[in-house]
Amino acid sequence: MFGLASRRELAARLRGRFDRAIVLPRSWKAALVPFMARIPERVGFLGEHRYGLLKERRKLDKQVLDQTVKRFVSLGLPLEEAQTGQFAIPKPRLPLLGIIW
């Protein structure tokens, strides 16, 4: 059910290795692994009643965060900065090849 055994196995491998998890999908299942891995800081948007699984639950304002990239980047920022929608989005880099767009 829900791939629970594989999620437990993944959580066990992650446990103790990370301080923060940014949960991008708004599903209950996506928040389950970081919770079971006991990652202390777990941030994501509200969705599918994930209240106990995420430590920091943010409301998604689609008017302010009108692009997927803005939504994802905002989860890595402090709440006050993220809510404005006025933040720089880093340009992609491939450091091994020295390519910058």
Image: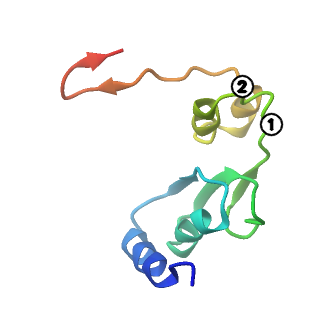
Q: Which residue is mark 2?
A: 85
Q: Earlier in the sequence, mark 1 or mark 2?
A: 1
Give the left or right position of residue 76, taking residue 65 as reference: left
Give the left or right position of residue 45, taking residue 30 as reference: right
Q: Residues within 10 Å of mark 2 (few under 14, many from 20)?
A: some
User: If the image is split into quadrants, where does the N terminus sit?
Assistant: bottom right
Give the left or right position of residue 67, taking residue 60 as reference: left
Kind of residue at badge 2: Gly
Q: Which of 11/39 is in front?
A: 11
Residue pictured at 44% horizontal, 20% vertical: 91
In the rendered image, the residue lying farthest to the front is 1
Label 1 to label 2: alpha-carbon separation = 9 Å
Residue pictured at 43% horizontal, 79% vertical: 6
The percent position of residue 85, horizontal first and vertical second, equals: 71, 25
Kind of residue at badge 1: Asp
Q: Secondary structure at mark 2?
A: loop
Q: Which residue is mark 1?
A: 61
Task: Give the foreground label among 1 and 2.
Answer: 1
Above or below, 22 against 9 in this view is: above
Q: Secondary structure at mark 1?
A: loop
In the rendered image, the residue lying farthest to the left is 97
Q: Residues within 10 Å of mark 1 (few under 14, many from 20)?
A: few
Q: Which of 84/47 is in front?
A: 47
Question: What is the quadrant of residue 28 in the picture?
Answer: bottom right
- Marks 1/2 in contact by CB < 8 Å: the verdict is yes
Above or below, 66 against 12 in this view is: above
The percent position of residue 53, horizontal first and vertical second, equals: 67, 68
Residue pictured at 59% horizontal, 39% vertical: 72
Above or below, 40 against 21 in this view is: below
